[in-house]
Image (cartoon, helix red, strand yellow):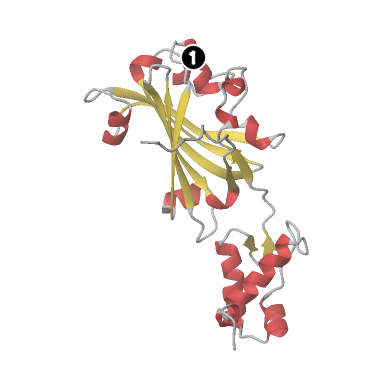
Amino acid sequence: MATTDDRRPKYQRIADSLREAIQSGEYGPGDRLPGENDLMATYGVARMTARQALSVLRDEGVAEARKGAGVFVRAFRPIRRRSIERLARDQWGNGRSIWSADIESRALEVDRITVSEETAPERISAALNLADEEMTCVRRRRFVLDGKPVLLATSYLPLPLVAGSAITQEDTGPGGTYARLAELGYEPVHFREEIRSRMPSKDETTQLSMAAGTPVILICRTAFTDEGRPVEINEMTLDAASYVLEYDFDAGPKTMPSNG
């Protein structure tokens, strides 16, 4: 009697075998994977089946095609995004970028920076408790790690809070936006992140140099002051194949059942 695994399409079984070989270290970052002819000979399958197997790995972001050379194990090492540690005041409060918690000594570049004054979209105005037509400072930028674009970010801040400060400049200085907000008397002490995923738009695929079939992760972070006032909303678009999202936290107090 055939097992469930045996009933999987042949291309999927081949893809699973190659993925296991990558995970075990048989094929390391940058190594060339067996080509279509190799897979046809090894597994006794048609070219289309071999091509589909390699496409699965490319769509997952595990492998990448190089024109005229073949399919290779993706060499880019995913970012382990330590979502709680990176936002600690010990980071930005001491002049460090929140990215330093994630990337260690890897090369980070921020490009395509624009800063403008705009009327916020309705969803942003509502989240920031803005009056109708109230202006926001909008900061857009792209983050490139080890030469690979990995994230697009757009931050919205109430303009009356930040007008005339370094937040309205391309370079916000040591510690970034949160350090400057603290200096202005609006120190962020609480953050909320909402996470979703979807397939990217054409523009996102181009800006992030993403392989076909790779989804994006959407993170919307809101920063609050001690009084509960929202002072920044940051909408981020991440290349899903470039990230591991890590959350490390303690369990809350145990809730005891009522005796009533």
Q: Residue furthest front?
A: 259
* Point 66% across, 42% down: residue: 146
Q: Residue furthest right?
A: 26
* Point 62% across, 76% down: residue: 13
Residue 31 picture location, percent across and down = 75, 61
Q: Quadrant of residue 101?
A: top right
Is residue 205 placed above or below 212 in the rendered structure?
above
Residue 184 picture location, percent across and down = 45, 11
Residue 44 picture location, percent across and down = 67, 87
Q: Residue furthest left?
A: 132
Is residue 198 placed above or below 116 in the rendered structure?
below
- Please rate how many residues cluster around mark 1, counting C-alpha atoms within 10 Å: few if below 14, some from 14 to 19, many from 20: some
Q: Amino acid at mark 1?
A: Ala
Q: Does residue 35 appear in the picture of this structure?
A: yes
- Whether residue 39 sits left or right of residue 163 in the image: it is right
Position of the N terminus by quadrant: bottom right
Residue holding disc 1: 182
- Whether residue 115 sits left or right of residue 14 in the image: it is left
Q: Quadrant of residue 64?
A: bottom right
Residue 72 picture location, percent across and down = 69, 63
- Element assignment for label 1: helix
Q: Does residue 70 appear in the picture of this structure?
A: no
* Point 69% across, 66% down: residue: 20
Q: Residue furthest bottom?
A: 1
Q: Nearer the viewer, residue 63 or 15?
A: 15
Q: Quadrant of residue 70?
A: bottom right
- Whether residue 111 sits left or right of residue 121 in the image: it is right
* Point 45% across, 13% down: residue: 165
Position of the C terminus by quadrant: top left
